[in-house]
Image (cartoon, helix red, strand yellow):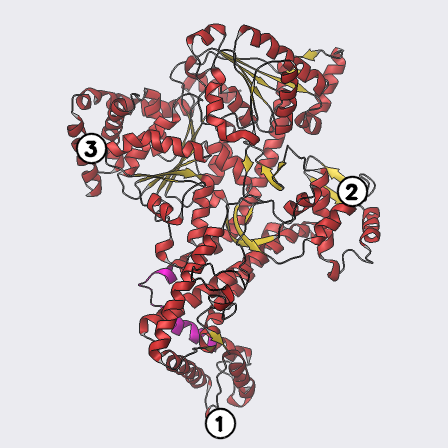
Amino acid sequence: MLQALMGKIFGTSNDRELKKYSKRVKNINALEAQYEALSDDELKKAFDEIRDAVKNEEKTLNDVLEDSFAITREVSKRVLEMRHFDVQLIGGMVLHEGRIAEMKTGEGKTLVATLAIVLNALSAKGVHLVTVNDYLASRDAIEMGVLYTFLGFSVGTVLESNATPEEKIQAYCCDITYGTNNEFGFDYLRDNMSYSAEQMAQKYHNFVIVDEVDSILIDEARTPLIISGPTNRTMQDYADANGIALKLTKDEHFTVDEKDKVVLITEDGITKAEELFGVENLYSVENASLPHALDQALKANYLFEKDVDYVVNSGEVVIVDEFTGRLSEGRRFSEGLHQALEAKEKVEIKEETQTLADITFQNYFRMYDKLAGMTGTAETEAAEFAQIYSLDVVSIPTNIPITREDLNDLIYKTEKEKFNAVIEIIKKLSKTGQPILIGTASIEKSEDLHDVLKKEKIAHTVLNAKNHEQEGEIIKNAGVKGAVTIATNMAGRGVDIKVNAEVEELGGLYIVGTERHENRRIDNQLRGRSGRQGNAGTTQFYLSLEDNLLRIFGSDKIKSIMERLGVEDGEFIESKMVTRAVEKAQKKVENMHYEGRKQIVEYDDVANEQRKIVYKFRNQLLDSDFDIIEKIDEVRVEYVDNILNNCDIFDGGAREDFNLKKLLEVVKEEINLDLSLQDYESLDFEELQEKITTEIKKSYNDKMSVLEEHIQHEIARELYLKELDNAWREHLYSMDTMKTGIRLRAYNQKDPLVEYKKESYNLFTELIKDIKFNTIKTLQIIQFRMESPEDEAAEVAQQLELQRKLDEAARELNHKSKDNEKVSVKKVSRNEPCPCGSGKKYKQCCGKSGPKKVLLLLE
């Protein structure tokens, strides 16, 4: 209350920020006449002078901001026939400063972004614009691209649908690149799986603007980006577990907590499951996979609903994104849940996968030197933006005051009564021709409503995950006279619904919400479809005590109010007190989700530090200037120190205590090098260390001397990369496994995160050691096939080229995924044609020499 009073007297911090920006807006407006008087060529020349001043470091981006904004606005007037409003100039400055611009729907955020993009593109390090889907990325790049090309900038797009690796490299080389959050994140992971610096697409992480920033950095940040490969585990357990899950009785054999989305099996359930599986002990080592499969089968059957959480399309289980309502093609739930859903729906159970590379959206976007965002709804999550991303939210006023009427929620006892009321309001409004947009929380509800409207013979359009390809067109037409549109949560985010004067006279677009979402921002997004640019409009939500949000989180209080008021069947209550109770329930869920996201970040921060170290070294290996031979020499010394210590030979120890026999056996076993005992008996520690290192190096150099120097370097580089990738893959699997069980330590009064940090550090130490020493061992034991050095060199060069093609082919087999969503790398059968394109069978070409590498024969 005190804070509100102070705000009225002195103005809020947001008001003070707007005042600061308004001063620069006046300066920009003062330049308008000057640039308006220039011809196109003169305008381009003026901009080139600014570009040169920044390039030569004579001026900073802040120094040229006003001129850059004024020129951008003038170019927009000429090529787009759109002039930036003053509030849009403020939005551009907010973005340039690396903050979040909260601007209501219809305020032209796409145009606002051009101001910050043009200014920051002057740095020549690339500017990225990230949005929620391919449609918006492609549309904005094409529409705004006219402005950028006028000023001499190149524009690229990275899309899931059609971008080849070569096209993506080209797109990232452009001054300005548009794309989706998934594509940017996955391209980063793919870059760090490539075997050539030339294959890496993303050169800079300079400045990024995230459109619909709340959707991407909050909602979608609950699930990391993961690229995965097969695990070779049997799928039969999931089919068996599904059958057994259906034979168990709820509340007797297991309990379901819908609030926390947890299913717990009881003691009676364990006994029954053991009987049905035909095993004595469900939790014995030999049955280790069964409890996990059963747990996932119970979740699939009792927590996940068809046409709500997923759909079945062409014999495949496809995830429905809970925030957008879109189908998430290529995504798969992790930890066997997707396999459990496939068993439930009796479709082909696809192979389980393991992580090959992963990153959270939080840690991907925090890599950028400057991160900014824009959305119509960010204020409710301002604390999270500040804590996780160090991003301030600046609320920018609308160009024209909002006249839309947001009515109080109407709450009914049952869902049936609620939908009867919804049908009545649709029938009433459709008679007048006032357009209506009905928001539903799931595909199932949108199709139920569709069936009823069909029976009532009310013409309408349905927009849900099953027909999202027509999304832009459907939403554009939702504001025409007589339009009745049913939409899931996606509601054409990013697409404006325009209304004409006739519709304005009828009251504008009428929004009917059929359920409150768990997050207030999603409701506000739906409301924001109406009343753009000062247009008339109305919004109202129809709720029932049977809605998931109220049933799970807040119905008791509301129910008692309804009973006290004596609400009869078919009647509703409408009061601010009830609306506040609903919002309180939403805040509970928002806090729960925030804690979940915070936990994901805390755990991934641990992995991220390791990821940075591994990827940095990996990039060094790909750098042609990196001295790989010097690195091998350095690691060889560490390797010798390690085997001396493992053989109980320590610096400062007595010579007679040295276990030389064990030492020479280890050297023979690990790197196949025969050393004579008598040559080492009289040596002290340092002499022993030096002589063994010299012998190992001599053995290696003798073998490699038949090859040209650049081939030697290439072999060492590629083998080091292979060892690093294999070890990193196993490390990620170990980290996943550890994370799954570490939370149980809370029962032992230990902080799981602290325990995770300790154990992951130990695992990482082992990882680094394994990468180094396994590389030395492999380099020492490789042998070449042929006797002629010339033939060998030619063969090695050819096989390296084939290997690159094979790696590239494997990369192209990858499909995108998010957390739960894992991308599969297809295995090549030994009798299939080789992916490298040679025309031979895989076993006779790149698969000829077994798992290590095609050019090597291991003894």
Residue at 46 percent across and 58 percent down: it is 835
756 vs 617, nearest the viewer: 617
Q: In which quarter of the image is residue 145?
A: top left
- Would you name the residue on which mark 1 appears? 678
Q: Which of marks 3 and 1 is nearer the N terminus?
A: 3
In this view, 751 is above or below 439:
below
Q: In this view, does 582 lie above or below 138?
A: above
760 or 186: which is nearer to us? 186
Tag shown at residue 246: 2
Quote the CA–CA distance across marks 2 and 1: 71 Å
Q: In which quarter of the image is residue 365?
A: top left
What range is drawn magenta here? 620-640
For marks 2 and 3, the one nearer the N-term is 3
Q: Distance between the residues labelled 2 and 3?
A: 69 Å
Closer-to-camera residue (558/735): 735
Foreground tag (3 vs 1): 3
Image coordinates of residue 425 in percent, x first then y, are 61, 11
Please give left or right for residue 550 compared with residue 168 in the image: right
Q: In this view, does 334 lie to the left or right of 124?
A: right
